[in-house]
Image: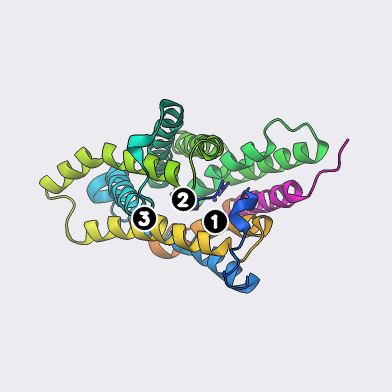
Amino acid sequence: MSTPAAGTTVTAPRDVAPAPAVVTAASTRHAPDAPVPSPVRGALLALGSAGVNQTGAAVGAQAFAAVGPAGVVAVRQVLAGAVLLAAVRPPLHRFTWRQWWPVLLLAVVFAGMNLSLYAAVERVGLGLAVTLEFLGPLAVALLGSRSRGDLLIAAGAALGVYVLVLPGPSSDWVGVGLALTAATCWASYILLNRLIGTRLPGLHGPAAACTLSGLAFLPLLAALLADGRLVGATLGQAVAAGVLASVVPYAADATALRHLPARYFGVLTSAHPLFAALAGLVVLGQVLELHEWVGVVVVVVVNVVAVVAHARPRRPA
């Protein structure tokens, strides 16, 4: 999962796959001295961010044999927390309990989202895991809706998942369950981020939550270093995952949102599952079967339709 872009309410990793996006209007305003928006530049940044994000996840997966998914997540979370803490400098000592409790929940969600996703990647592959994770933001977009169009979108997503998984005796249900757990965490991230955005300014909430999540992983990181398992190529792969799947997307997505309307950014973000499948193929040698490619494409199309449908202004009843 991508971590979703900092400063936005994103329906598209997260830390890994972050990914459609529902972004507040404030994130697309421009200061008087800001550069003139360039849609082409914004599109290239958004697509580049998705590609780099999933490549980072694939590189991190190469370290699973030495330190496991939890070891890679530990490096990623500590690195992301350190970067955000230094860049944002949230005034933690001034937080009230009303601000702290959603931040604490978000820290748990960060950890759960990345652990479950990386564990799913180890079992079912990057493309399948990230595609299933995308059901989280899609569920939030459809939450509470009773319109015929949204019901068709939900039915399309269910069809895509069925084609993707093709349930049978050989299905890895534990891996599928872990990916759906990541989807649930991503949906929780969106809802918590909306709440935190009403109680804390800017990136103070996400920065604090990411820092706390990183602190929770410090004992594991210290144990891996003391055991000599996090050295050489393994350390490089874990650090690359943190940089490519967290730090770079934060900056790229924030910049892209200055050049693109939120709905277009959401459409481009929906390409994450495709990039995940390609990264899994090129970096990890994970070859998807035809039905899996069809399922990935169906879920991507459904997400694009959901973004476009929910970006349109609704007429009053």
Residue type, mark 1 in image? His
Q: Residues within 10 Å of mark 1 (few under 14, many from 20)?
A: many
Q: CA distance from mark 3 to mark 2?
A: 20 Å
Q: CA distance from mark 2 to mark 1?
A: 9 Å
Q: Which mark is residue 206?
A: none
Q: For the stretch drawn in magenta, what is the main secondary structure?
A: helix
Of residues 217 and 26, the one drawn nearer to the viewer in this rendering? 26
Magenta stretch: give its range.
Answer: 293-317
Dot placed on the residue nearer the N-terminal end, 3 or 2:
2
Give the residue drawn at x 28%, y 53%. Answer: 63
Instruction: Label 1: state its secondary structure.
Output: helix
**Contact (CB < 8 A) between labels 3 and 2?**
no
- Residue 106, image x and y in percent? 44, 35
Q: Is residue 187 magenta?
A: no
Residue bearing mark 1:
272
- Residue 222, image x and y in percent? 16, 43
Residue bearing mark 2:
2
Instruction: Label 2: state its secondary structure.
Output: loop
Dot placed on the residue nearer the N-terminal end, 2 or 1:
2
Q: Nearer the viewer, mark 2 or mark 1?
A: 2
Residue type, mark 2 in image? Ser
Give the residue drawn at x 80%, y 41%. Answer: 149
Give the left or right position of residue 308, taking residue 274 as reference: right
Q: Which mark is residue 87?
A: 3
- Residue 110, image x and y in percent? 41, 40
Give the left or right position of residue 80, taking residue 173 as reference: left
Instruction: Label 3: state its secondary structure.
Output: helix
Residue 170 appearing in the image: no
Give the left or right position of residue 263, taking residue 17 as reference: right
Of residues 16 and 58, the one drawn nearer to the viewer in this rendering? 16
